Amino acid sequence: MAATTDLRLLGQRVRHARRAAGMTLADVAGAVGRTPAWLSQLENGKVEPRLGQLGDLAAALGTSTSDLLEDRAPDRRAELELKLERLQGEARYASLGLPRLKASAKLPDVVLEHLVALAEALPDTADSPEVARRQRAGDRARLANIELRREMRTRGNYFEEIEQVAASMLAAVGYPGHGPINERHLTDLAAHCGFRIERVPGMPRTARSVTDQRARIIYIPRREDLTIRAARSVILHTLGHFALDHRETRDFGDYLRQRIESNYFAAAVLLPEAPSVELLEQMKEARDLSVEDLKEQFYVSYEMAAHRFTNLATRHLGIPVHFLRTDPEGVITKAYENDGIPFPTDADGGVEGERVSRQWGARQAWSTSDSFLLHYQFTETDLGEYWCVTYTETSNERTPHAITLGSTGADARWFRGGDTLRRLDARTATNTVDPDLLARWEGVAWPSAAERSHVLSALPAGGRAFTPFPGVDLLDVYRFLDRVNGRS
């Protein structure tokens, strides 16, 4: 193919031809001997097919290679989507500091027309210092992460093409359709992808696994260094890259997408869609939905079970949800929502590194007497009432953290613990800081920040102002000083 081929335009033309032919991703992928995930990436401009593959695609779609390679959009909608994508890559758009907007199918044509016209009318600010700042790798990484989260929210965190790959592979190795997968299934899945698994000592500290693609061996740590449950996850994350036809990443956006997709694949194998949905539907009918039952049924961690719940809840149960992974101080390391809960965000719209309100369940759970007790709570926010369940993990294997899964207050009726009487108010108007407290200690207190595994995790993101003590909750410090000085 020509070096100047516009992969986004090619993807649009392939998608247009597929839909015109009335074919699904699985139909076309099967016809050309590829996976639905590969075809989805091609349609989104993420992979470049070889000329022979393009010919196979044209034949399967009932068109010609030259038609697929035409340098014009197949229709006005596709033309607008391509324009919006290109405009968002220009410096004048980046100077606004807005997260990237994906033109999902739900975005009306008239709105898309307005967005493109407005973006085209922006003045040229390519020499702006702010634009130069946002071109740094750190900012590009944050914006790529924000864009991916927006896409996940639009899809309800459900990736049909990856579900299909996982289901077909499980069927190929004889998974019975219920219960957790066993070690034989893992070995057979690896063989199905052309690999074998070897446990070895002396693994690099920074790698979960190492794959020798020439010898077709996946190396993982010894049994004494990696539990069976953890090993299943590591092996499947690795196999996911090969099952989903991943290639070497071109930028941080590619890297993040591959991580998300391989993680999704691992969860879809460990908690297969059909039996997981069957269990969830039974629990919903009994108004007893719980992450812990999903965890026990498939022998996975609470975090994986909670994250898998977000994959399936909206698609199969009709319940929008939110998910958080936070440290004991409430700093967010992972987050997802499609129920409208107001996560704290930085100037770019990112949430990682932000601290949730001390009234939220993710922080309140740490004050319970039993660190493994599930903490149920309703929280009133500026945007309405939300319910959540929080599980705290304090084992020696990992840094202490909390996993929170929640929904709107109206949907709490479907969950175990949805009848809790614990209610806290986290609205801005009712949680103002005592001005006398600030006056007493601002400029007086000098805390030394606790050690973190990564220094940058303590630093402010995006356009937030730098503070003298990044990563420190100064309100907690001021209250501590009040307490030791006999003011409380």
Image (cartoon, rainbow, N blue to C red):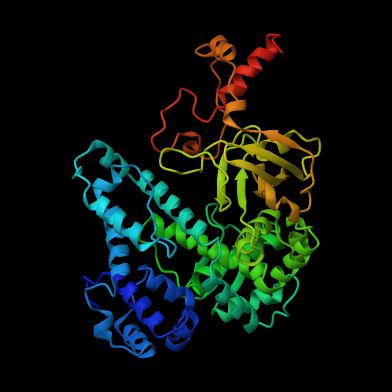
The residue shown at (55%, 60%) is 156
Q: Is residue 103 left or right of residue 283?
A: left
| Viewer-nearest residue: 27 or 297 | 27
The residue shown at (79%, 39%) is 421
| Quarter of the view holding residue 367 | top right
Please, which residue is most extreme toward the front here?
Answer: 110
Is residue 8 among the parts visible in the rendering? no
Q: For the N terminus, give its image quadrant.
A: bottom left
Q: Give the image location of residue 397, x and y in percent.
A: 68, 48
Instruction: Give the answer, above or below, for where 460 lies relative to 13.
Output: above
Q: Give the image location of residue 152, x and y in percent.
A: 50, 58
| Quarter of the view holding residue 440 | top right
| Viewer-nearest residue: 115 or 463 | 115
Q: How many numbered marks appear?
A: 0
The residue shown at (81%, 35%) is 369
Q: Give the image location of residue 139, x and y in percent.
A: 37, 44
Q: For the C terminus, give its image quadrant.
A: top right
Is residue 292 among the parts visible in the rendering? yes
